[in-house]
Amino acid sequence: MKIRIVGGGPAGLYFAALMKRDNPAHDIVIYERGPRDATWGFGVVFSDRALEFLRADDEAMYQRLMPLMQTWPNLTIVHNDTRVPIAGNGFAAIGRLELLSLLYAHTESLGVKIEFDSEVTTLDQPALAGADLVVAANGAFSWVRNENADKFGTETDLRRNRFIWFGTSKVFDSLSLTFRETEHGVFCAHHYRYSPRMSTFLVEVTDDTWQRAGFADMSEEETIRHCEQVFAKDLEGAPILSNKSCWRQFPAVSNRQWSVDNVVLMGDALRTAHFSIGSGTRLAMEDAIALWKALRDTGNLPEALALYQERRLPPMTKILDAASASIRWYERMDQLIHLAPLDFAYSYMTRTGRVDHSEVTRRDPRLAAAWEHSHPEIYGDSY
Ligand SMILES: Cc1cc2nc3c(=O)[nH]c(=O)nc-3n(C[C@H](O)[C@H](O)[C@H](O)COP(=O)(O)OP(=O)(O)OC[C@H]3O[C@@H](n4cnc5c(N)ncnc54)[C@H](O)[C@@H]3O)c2cc1C
């Protein structure tokens, strides 16, 4: 099969590797517009169960990734100066560049060609000519999808909150969500270490806070200084580091039709999941597994593409529902911050509707008991 892939992110790379592993006769080329050694961003985080999806289909990849991951068993919510540790929420993180380097080496060792510095700009481009299958794995702003939005049934909902993806040399001991009230509104930092020397430090604010703080007129340097002041107690003197960092609004993307003719969407081009549930990379790799399996299990391309959507839609919908509830929670953080720290942390834990009180109790009995104790109106005052 002649397969051409637009975009060398986790989705495109992993799909190519799975296909080539199964059948070395496939002719697969990935076109990646960036150079081999450059990438945006710092680290990405998976929930502790998020890597389990790899094990069943690709134990070797799981074993290669695990030693590179930073892992920790707890989550910490910081409500101004109060820290609320929450047990039973394990996470694992890795630098995006490290993940991509591993995938480049793995994919190339199987015989897939990756053309770096190669931007594909139209479906008529000679690079794609004669392909049996064209995979659009070119990220959240995919032109393949946008230029055919009517055929794919694309919906894009640009959310109001603003976020900026920074790093820092301060190494945190757990995945932390720090909320600090300022004169302009609440600032939230999502921060976690992804290597022994570096952490991701993503700052999120509501649009009102962003406007009041005057970020629209600040330089990158001024933006960094402002965020360093807000989170001075958390950074303890460590600098915030930029990597082409700029303020963005999250585009929540979905598509009714995942393929048109021989062109199929995958990864962030197919849908985006808010970073607060930490699943974008996992979903991208799961898409790759799902398309590979659909091609393996059917006799022809149209059937395979239909099966890909049919099988993948239900589990993906569950995660997207959780992601969209999570987005809305962050959009209300200026009101929610008025809750007491324990209630705030509890509200965070239950924000997607997928974790109820019994699940909080299972994960962290002490937190659940403290919350029951502070709510005698619900649980009685016999504690
Ligand atoms: C701020 C932020 C934080 C995130 N945090 C996490 C996290 O903690 N955990 C997590 O799992 N996920 C996280 N994500 C999401 C994650 O980065 C993506 O979901 C994941 O990378 C999707 O993989 P992908 O292969 O579909 O797309 P991408 O990783 O975006 O890769 C697409 C590739 O296509 C290339 N490309 C684009 N256009 C062209 C073209 N015309 N020609 C050739 N190449 C092209 C790009 O250069 C890029 O390399 C985060 C995202 C953001 C924005």
Image (tube, rainbow, N blue to C red):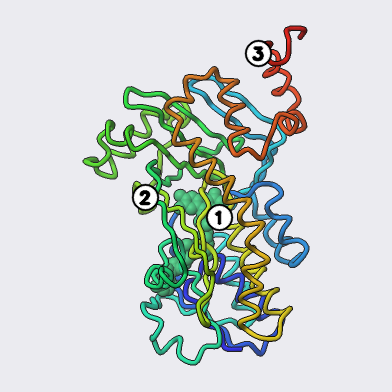
Q: CA distance from mark 2 to mark 1?
A: 19 Å
Residue 87 picture location, percent across and down: 70, 31
Look at the picture and state if 140 lies above or below 366.
Answer: below
Query: Which quadrant: the C terminus?
Result: top right
Task: Please tell me which residue is depicted at 53% across the width and 52% down the height of the picture.
Answer: 273
Look at the picture and state if 62 lies above or below 174.
Answer: below
Q: CA distance from mark 1 to mark 3?
A: 36 Å
Q: Mark 1 — residue?
A: 280
Residue 3 picture location, percent across and down: 56, 84
Look at the picture and state if 341 lies above or below 143.
Answer: above
**Disc 3 marks which amino acid?**
Ser
Q: Mark 3 — residue?
A: 374
1 and 3 marks in contact (CB < 8 Å): no
**Disc 2 marks which amino acid?**
Ser
Q: Of helix, strand and loop, which one carries label 2?
A: loop
2 and 1 marks in contact (CB < 8 Å): no
Return the residue nearer the eye: 119 or 350.
Answer: 350
Label 3 packing within 10 angstroms: few (<14), some (14-19), many (20+): some
Q: Earlier in the sequence, mark 1 or mark 3?
A: 1
**Disc 1 marks which amino acid?**
Gly
Quadrant in which residue 226 is drawn? top left
Q: Mark 2 — residue?
A: 245
Residue 42 in view here: no
Task: Please tell me which residue is depicted at 54% across the width and 64% down the height of the picture.
Answer: 267
Label 1 packing within 10 angstroms: few (<14), some (14-19), many (20+): many
Q: Of helix, strand and loop, which one carries label 3?
A: loop
Q: Earlier in the sequence, mark 2 or mark 3?
A: 2
2 and 3 marks in contact (CB < 8 Å): no
Residue 237 picture location, percent across and down: 43, 31
Query: Is the CB–ligand 1 distance for label 1 below 8 Å?
Result: yes
